[in-house]
């Protein structure tokens, strides 16, 4: 851009932005990239992306300046700058970098397996009753393969897996598996409370 007065002006402005921004950053690195492109149909100025160090994925956030995007909403001649972050991508970054705590005080004590629509309704009744009694319990969100539900419980540090299948829809006792020892017992509500509180 040596021969372009407009290009040199742009570089001067970018240097100003970078130098001023760096003054307030201690833990982030700013990189100027000519090849970066985003939303060409509405960004009209500087654009930016946010990436996480040590993670093999693209950006976790991005945005830029737009001169008249708000005219879509009836506000003409109003410029602005916007940014958004991807929650799923941030979660994946935390997972890849092992930044989630291995244990948490708020982890459920009992996970109820999900075997389907009818079974999950009954299982949730058990969950609600346990929670009302001060026992941390949750229901797996969908009827996935049982191994996936076991892995979920193991990853979250949940000690017990309760099983409410077709045979337990009207039963007063249900199978409860100790995920640490592999031992499985059939317990009523009071038995589950005693088991968890004694753990």
Image (cartoon, helix red, strand yellow):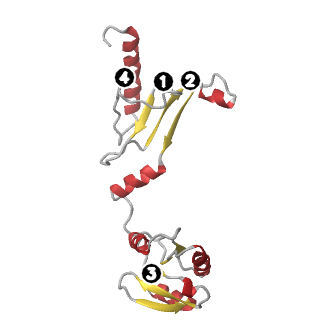
Q: Nearer the viewer, mark 4 or mark 2?
A: 2
Q: Earlier in the sequence, mark 4 or mark 1?
A: 4
Q: Quick check: marks 1 and 2 in contact, CB under 8 Å?
A: yes
For the C terminus, which image quadrant? bottom left
x then y, percent, for residue 109: 48, 78
Tell me the CA gap for discs 3 and 4: 57 Å
Residue at image mark 3: 160
x then y, percent, for residue 116: 55, 74
Q: Earlier in the sequence, mark 3 or mark 4?
A: 4
Residue at image mark 1: 45
**Residue sitting at x 59%, y 28%:** 69
Tell me the CA gap for discs 4 and 2: 21 Å
Residue at image mark 2: 67
Relative height, residue 118 to residue 73 (above, below)? below
Indicate the secondary structure of the residue bearing disc 2: loop
In front: 108, or 154? 154
**Residue sitting at x 36%, y 13%:** 8
Residue at image mark 4: 15
């Amino acid at each position: 851009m040596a021969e372009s007065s407009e290009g040199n002006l742009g570089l001067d402005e970018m240097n100003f932005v970078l130098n001023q921004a760096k003054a307030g950053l201690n833990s982030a690195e700013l990189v100027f990239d000519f090849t970066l492109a985003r939303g060409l149909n509405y960004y009209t100025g500087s654009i930016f992306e946010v990436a996480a160090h040590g993670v093999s994925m693209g950006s976790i956030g991005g945005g830029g300046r737009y001169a008249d995007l708000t005219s879509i909403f009836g506000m003409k001649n109003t410029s602005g700058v916007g940014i958004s972050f991807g929650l799923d991508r941030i979660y994946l970054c935390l997972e890849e970098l092992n930044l989630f705590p291995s244990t948490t005080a708020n982890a459920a004590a009992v996970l109820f397996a999900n075997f389907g629509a009818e079974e999950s309704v009954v299982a949730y009744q058990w969950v609600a009753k346990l929670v009302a009694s001060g026992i941390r319990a949750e229901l797996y969100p969908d009827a996935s393969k049982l191994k996936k539900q076991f892995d979920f419980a193991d990853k979250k540090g949940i000690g017990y897996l309760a099983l409410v299948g077709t045979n337990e829809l009207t039963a007063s006792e249900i199978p409860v598996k100790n995920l640490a020892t592999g031992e499985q017992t059939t317990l009523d509500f009071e038995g589950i409370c005693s088991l968890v509180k004694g753990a």
